[in-house]
Image (cartoon, rainbow, N blue to C red):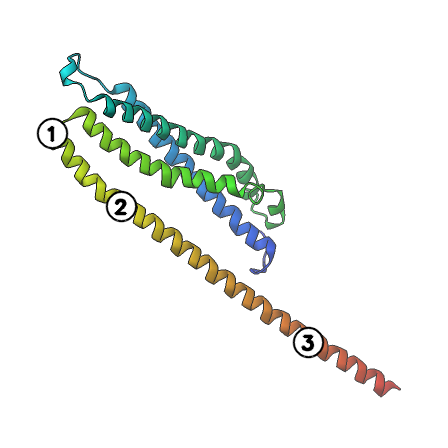
Amino acid sequence: MSDLSPDFHTQRYLSWKKLHLSRAKLKASSKTSALLSGFAMVAMVELQLSDKPEDRPAPVVMILFVIVTTLLVVVHMLALMISTCILPNLESVCTLDMINLVEESPHEKLHWYIETAWAFSTLFGLLLFLVEIGILCWMKFSGVAAWSATIILIPVLFLFLGFAAHFYISLISHKYKTTAAAFKELEEMEQKIKYHSMMDSRRHDMSEFDVV
């Protein structure tokens, strides 16, 4: 930051930290969404089915493939759209590297949009991507090969959900601890300020008494 000695406990500095965090989330969201949505489109276009009805996958599998692929593309496109619309406004403030201009950034007002893009890209989008892999295995293979892929993917899905839950719980706990520590420090600073102001007022009263 351009400020030489910023106060790390002011509202402006906290907003500046949120600005850079929102910027990083939108960048990661846009890259992930563009990559995975492109993969889903290629998988749908390049998928080739046999001309023989007996060699084609079951209709239920084909319907699931279409639904999951469409949801995957829609979720990632929504996250990409949010990132593309909001990110330039954040970049224009971050590139100036001036904390005094943090109020011009819309990251506080658009906080829920940023979190939605992040959740769609990293949580729902990746879950749909894993399901897409499993369905693709059933579309291309059958029997032991398809069941092997399903057996591998089921514990991976549970591990993914467990990691996501643990990550978000740890993140919330960390935010709570840092916020509580910041409030405690602010209270201590307030008490010190009150003490010094009280001592100054006493000194002022004593000086007036001495003059009299």
What whole-number distance in Å separates the C-alpha atoms at marks 1 and 2?
A: 23 Å
Specify the farthest residue to the left: 144
Which residue carries the number 1 mark? 143
Q: Which mark is residue 196?
A: 3
Outermost residue on the front side: it is: 60
Q: Amino acid at mark 1?
A: Gly
Left or right, residue 127 beside residue 141: right
Compare marks 1 and 2 and give the one earlier in the sequence: 1
Q: Amino acid at mark 2?
A: Phe
The quarter holding residue 39 reads top left
Give the mark nearest the N terminus, 1 or 3.
1
Question: Which residue is disc 2 drawn over?
Answer: 158
Residue 175: x percent and y percent? 46, 57
Of 1 and 204, the residue lying toward us = 204
> Which residue is farthest right?
212
**Along the polypeptide, which appears first: circle 3 or circle 2?**
2
Question: Disc 3 to disc 2, how far (Cα)?
Answer: 57 Å
